[in-house]
Amino acid sequence: MATIPNPRVWAAGEVPTHTMFNTEIRDAVNFLKAPQRALVDDTTNDTVNEETWTVISWGAEDADTEAIHSTSSNQSRLTAVTTGYYLAWAQIVWEKVDPVSGKYAGSQAVGARQVAIRKNANGDFGSGTLVALDCRHVHDNIVRTSECSSQSCSGYVQLNPGDYIQAFVWNNQENLFTTDLNDVMHDLGNAVKFGMIWQWS
Amino acid sequence: MAIPSLRTWTRGELATAAMLNANIRDVPNWLLRPPIFQSSRLNNQSISNASWSVVLLEGSFINTDGMTLSSGVVTVVTRGIYDCRCQAFFQSHGTGVRGVSIDRLDVDGNFVENPVRSGELSSTSPPNENTNVLTGTALSCGKLISLNPGEKLRMMVYQNSGGALNLLGDGTHMFSWFAMRWVAEN
């Protein structure tokens, strides 16, 4: 756990020592110039069943300053080690739904797409507390042009050591030919990201 | 809050306790908890059709700098560049567009600019089965905005479903919110 600086009140007649300077200057600046943070990637496509909030698992780390994330256990979680308010954000990319060609040829992009961040939800969207949410409808004329649709959400969240956040996604894409089509989150050039960074005490 | 203004130390100068407090202690104290404001619309707010409306934020959940909130307008105390963000959560409806934005106002409350805006069409079926979240459409936007003391921000929303439409709230959770955090001097 990183030590949040607790600046001393200097008293008249006090002789500063090198230990004091290291704590009061060096450590404080080091803490603030490199705040605790993690940024993780989704390394594989994830199947997201229709109308089912699905927690995303993150298989790779771009940054992780103090074991906020693990690639071997609870991969969906970013767990605070240091107390504080964090800025949390999630960005996802949805698979292309193409009426002309591709996996879903003949289909229309319809329905809604959602991404959310929840605190201490244990993988269950019905648990914990909401941090941020983005909920949008998808439009065939937009998706057809841009091929994939992306969305993101962000928000501030207070976390104590052991508190964690998870990112969830949801869609209700309906297939014109089958009844069991799932929308799949697409790993598009590592554009699927989840992160948090310490902001204030 | 006074932004730390650090002295240039000179040779032979005797460092007093006052100097150390002002130039060492106060700096991390400032950076650990800079000016921050966060508020939310906890309860429903009816939004008129086809006009931008101010979100009537209800209270300040975090306010480290004595910023004032009046009729949805937040007044800045300390100059600086702020990271400003907001999220709006609309009642589900299948017609029209939805928008969210942040307005910057001058010290007299006059509109200056609309630094950031986000929107979407809602002409297809609305989402449903939003377990543990009210059914609706959520939009967000954010930007770094340079502000001086007395200048103001307000969160705005738009919808043209054909009639009044609610920003949704359940009295407890922050579905629609506004936040700003000092990040640098301007």
Image: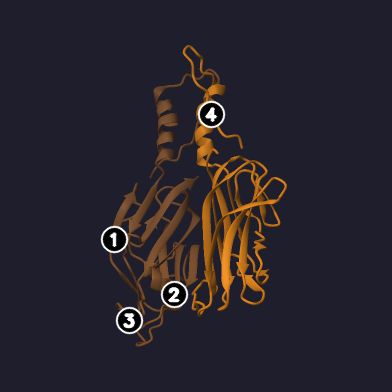
Chain colours: A brown, B orange
Among numbered discs 4 and 3, the one appearing first in the sequence: 4
Q: Looking at the picture, how far across and down is residue A27, in whole percent?
A: 41, 34
Q: Quadrant of residue B47?
A: bottom right
In the picture, residue B48 is in which quadrant? bottom right
Q: Which residue is mark 1?
A: A59
Q: Which chain is disc 1 placed on?
A: A
Number of the label disc, if any, that sits on residue A9: 4
Q: Amino acid at mark 3?
A: Ala
Indicate the amino acid at tag 2. Asn
At 33% from the left edge and 50% from the top edge, which residue is drawn? A63
Q: Which residue is drawn at the image coordinates 53% and 29% (left, top)?
A: A9
Q: Numbered disc 4: what chain?
A: A
Name the residue carrying label 3: A105
Q: Mark 3 to mark 1: distance in Å?
A: 30 Å
Element at badge 1?
loop
- Is residue A12 shown above or below A120? above
Q: Quadrant of the N terminus of chain B?
A: top right
Between disc 3 and disc 1, the foreground one is 3
| Of residues B30 and B139, the one drawn nearer to the viewer in this rendering | B139
Question: Observer-nearest residue: B88 or A145?
Answer: A145
In space, the residues marked 4 and 3 are separated at their CA atoms by 69 Å
Give SS at disc 2.
helix
Q: Earlier in the sequence, mark 1 or mark 4?
A: 4
Quarter of the image for residue B34 reads top right
The residue that mark 2 highlights is A141
Helix, strand or loop status at disc 4: loop
Looking at the picture, how far across and down is residue A179, in whole percent? 37, 87
In the image, are marks 4 and 2 on the same chain?
yes
Measured Cα–Cα span from mark 1 to mark 2: 33 Å
**Do the residues indicated by labels 1 and 2 lie within the same chain of the protein?**
yes
